[in-house]
Every structure is written in C-alpha cells, then in structure tokens.
Image (tube, helix red, strand yellow):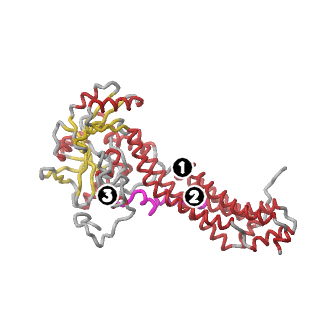
Amino acid sequence: MKSKINLYLIEYAINSILRQKFKNIFILFIFILLTSILASIFFISNSIKYELNSTLKALPQITVQKLKAGRHYDINTNVVDEIINIAGVTDAIPRVWGYYYFANLGANFSIIGIDEYENQYKTSLNKIIKEFDFSKALENNSMIVGEGVKKALNENYYNEYFNFIKPDGTFKKVNIAGVFKSSLELESNDTILLPKELALEIFGMDDSKATDIVVKVANPEEIPTVANKIKLLYPDTRVITNKDLEISYQNIFDYKGGIFLAVFIVAIFTFFIIVYDKASGLSSEEKREIGVLKALGWKIEDVLKEKFYESFIISFFGYIFGVLIALTFVYVFNAPLLSNLFSGYSELKTSFQLPFVLDVNTLFLLFFLTVPIYIASTIIPSWRSATIETDKVLR
Amino acid sequence: MNKKSKYLISILSLTIIAIFFEIFYLSSFKSLKQTQIDEKLSLLKVTALPDLAISTEAMYIRHRSLADTFSIFKESPELREYFPSTFVYSHSHIFSNTPSKVINEK
C-alpha cells in the first residue's frame, strides 16, 4: 500500500487547531516552557561536566598525603626519594599548597607554591598568564593571582601588593605581578601562585616539609600497584589515585544532579498529568466532530491520521521552540538564574561562560519524552471514539 | 495547498533553519577551543589541583576530592545545605547575625 502525506488532512488539522485557538495556544505554551526548562537544565549540567572532564587527564596520577591523628599533616620531603625508587614511578614532586582565609571577604584563597627553577613550569606558565616573567618571582617577592582574587584585593585597597599574615603574627608583603587569563576563571578564580619558598614562609612550614607528594606513573595500568606499594611503605599516608578523583567528581555531580532530578521529576509528572487528563477522554464536542466526520464517510484511519497531524504539529512546534529557547538562554545569555543552581552563591563568585557542547542524547531524550507521549495521548482517545458506531457518538 | 499550510510549512522550516544556524553559531563561537583546553591543561600541570573554583568558603569544598579523610564527615556525610556557598542566592545583607563575616558588602 502506498501511503502519501495527505495535504488536505494537514489543512484540516491546521484549521482544527485554529478553531480551538486558546486551548491549543495554552498547550503549546506549556509545552515550550517544559521543554525549554528541561533542556536548559540538561545543557548547563552537561557543560559544567564537560569542563571538568576535559581537564581530568592532566591531574596527577597519585597524590600522597600524610595523616596524623586522623588529620592531614605535613609530609617529610625525604619520602620522595623512596617513592621515586619504586619501579614504574617516573617522578615524585613534593608540593606546597594550602588555603589562606581572607577574613575581610569570608573566603579562602588557594595558595600554591611552585618551584620557579623547574623547567617544566616555564612553558606552561607562559601560556596561562597575561604578561609576566616568573623567573624572578622570588627576588621580587611576587605572586600571580586569579581574577577573583585580584578583584577582591582591589576592593580592599590592595592594588599592588598584599600583606599575608604569617602564623607567628608578622606580615609578609608580596607583590601582585600577574593575573591568570580570564578564560581560566573557573579553575583559577581563587588561586594564588607564588614561589615555593614564599609559600613555605606564609604557611610557617619547615623547608623539609611538604603538603603532599604528587607521583607520576609511566603506565596508567600500574597506578593501583604503585599506590598499593606506597601504602605498604608508609601506612600513615592516604594515597589518592586519579580514579578516586574521578569518582569524587561523579559524586559531586550526583549530589547536585539530585536537585536537577527533582525538578525533572516534577516537570515530567506535570506533563503526565496533562497527558492523562487528555487521554482519559475527549470532550463531547470532539466526539461529536469525529462522529460527523465518520458520517461524512471518513474512515477510522483518516480520522486517526488527522488527529496525528494535529498533535504532531503542536508537539513538534513546542519541542523545536523549546530547544531553540533553551539554546539561546543557556549559551547566548549564559543561563541567568538557572546556572546559580549549580554554581551557588559564594563570596568569590566566578562569572564563567558555559562552553557549548552539542549533546545529541539530551535532545533525543527530550524528544522521546514529550512528542510521542503527547501524540499517543491524542490518538488513543480519538481511536476509542472513532471505533464506536457513528450514530451512538452523534446521539 | 492553502495559505495556512504554506504559513505552517514556512514557519516550521524557518525554525529548523534557525536551530541549525544557532548550533553552528554556538559551536564555532561559544564552544571550548583547543587552545583554551590546552591553557586549562597547562594550568593544571602547574597547580596539579583538581575541582572548579565555584565554592571557596571552606577548605573542604574547594579541592573537595583532596580534602581530609574526615573533614566533610565531621560536618555531615552528605554535606547538608547549611553553608552559604551551596545555596543558590546570597542571604539577606540588610540584617546580619554573623558579625565576623560579610563586612564589606556592597
């Protein structure tokens, strides 16, 4: 059997939609609202996830922390020599980093000390800082700060330098020499990067101590074995592999995703209630219309086709407009209001751009959750009344 | 084909074209470029610290995946929403019971 799209049926469907203008506009409006909200939420979460996962590769394979009295404690740097001797380990770097609580703002800065003489940092640093030569950072007592830190310090009248309060109560004046590129805001907003010696001084730490040790392993397959060996060598340490970091990312997303799931469930339930209400029966007018059509000689098939076109036009328009609005809202206007669900409120707030990722899965999920269900909810009751004897419907 | 179906089909094709155009526009201007990803990777190479700088109020919510073993658990294992940074909006700045914090509000 050859089936062609019957243009007259489409025309009839359009007329039938326009006949009940207000009802259909209302349904279309709800449809657009639902799809655009759901799509925006999915787009935002996908973008942030993408942002995090795109940098997951660069994270250290193993991080070794010392635990003392159940707390994170400074680790001795001589541990490094023994870790390097483990087969498969290419490098182990003692690291100095920590937080500095800036009471005026109520926020923590992340202070990271790096070895300014190490070659591996130089090329990387050139890429990420606006203009600065880090090689003389120690002599000049200078640091590189994130955009958020710079803004916060400016607001507190620290335009050129900042006085860190050391644990012994004295001040340490450090010059602001550079700012991280604004495209890195999401990663470096609260970051202060300075030479290791300065960081040790600000934290009041001994030269022989480090915050933790970063271990590089040549073969990714060997990471668990190396981690086990370190754990056996130093039972007082906590060994974090990059797999653990990945899992913890997932946990963060599951936690925030729970909020999204709640919104999603509410929206879907609302939609199902509307659909159920439609499916539970047609109005007597609609029944009458079907009866008249059948009396005029329409087949059941034709009635169903017409109803299909009618519901498809409404739901497909709703879907397309919803996606269009969501794309514009999230990626052009950066999702005002909704993105706060994820980023939250914070004193050192980042104003990041959501990177665009085309997520075909989300689009398909939304399509199959809305359009076919709406079509079914229109067709099933029409089919029910179309199969009843014509005179019964008309009477 | 009557006028109405012509309108319908033209609106439909217009919106579909608009979607494709917008996707094209976004993917060429708003997506992460390779240079930006490289910059991010080199930043991480230097700092080697995970997590995004979204929440900075307490140590254990910045670099959460490297936090102390017990630092979250001494508060609550599932991180209850009592901390300002996990809320969507800022608290009221007109009336504040926490004098140690939030001094320089605009």
Q: Give the percent coordinates (x, y) of residue B51.
A: 36, 47
Tell me the CA gap for discs 1 and 3.
30 Å
Look at 59% across and 67% down and name the residue there.
Answer: A30
Q: Which residues are magenta?
A: A320-345
Q: Nearer the viewer, residue B74 or A168?
A: B74
What numbered label is drawn on residue A348?
3
Look at 71% across and 71% down and name the residue there.
Answer: A18
Chain of the residue under label 2: A
Tell me the CA gap for discs 2 and 1.
12 Å
Mark 2: amino acid:
Val
Q: Is residue A170 above or below residue A56?
A: below
Q: Is residue A340 above or below residue A90?
A: below
Q: Is residue A91 above or below residue B59?
A: above
Mark 1, secondary structure of its residue: loop
Q: Give the percent coordinates (x, y) of residue B16.
A: 63, 56
Q: Give the percent coordinates (x, y) of residue A93.
A: 27, 34
What numbered label is drawn on residue A358?
1
Tell me the chief SS of the magenta region. helix
Mark 3: amino acid:
Leu
What numbered label is drawn on residue A323?
2
Q: Nearer the viewer, residue B86 or A187?
A: B86
Contact between marks 3 and 2 (CB within 8 A): the answer is no
What numbered label is drawn on residue A301?
none
Q: Can residue A76 be spotted in the picture?
A: yes
Question: Taking A308 as reference, is A58 left or right?
Answer: left
Tell me the CA gap for discs 3 and 2.
32 Å
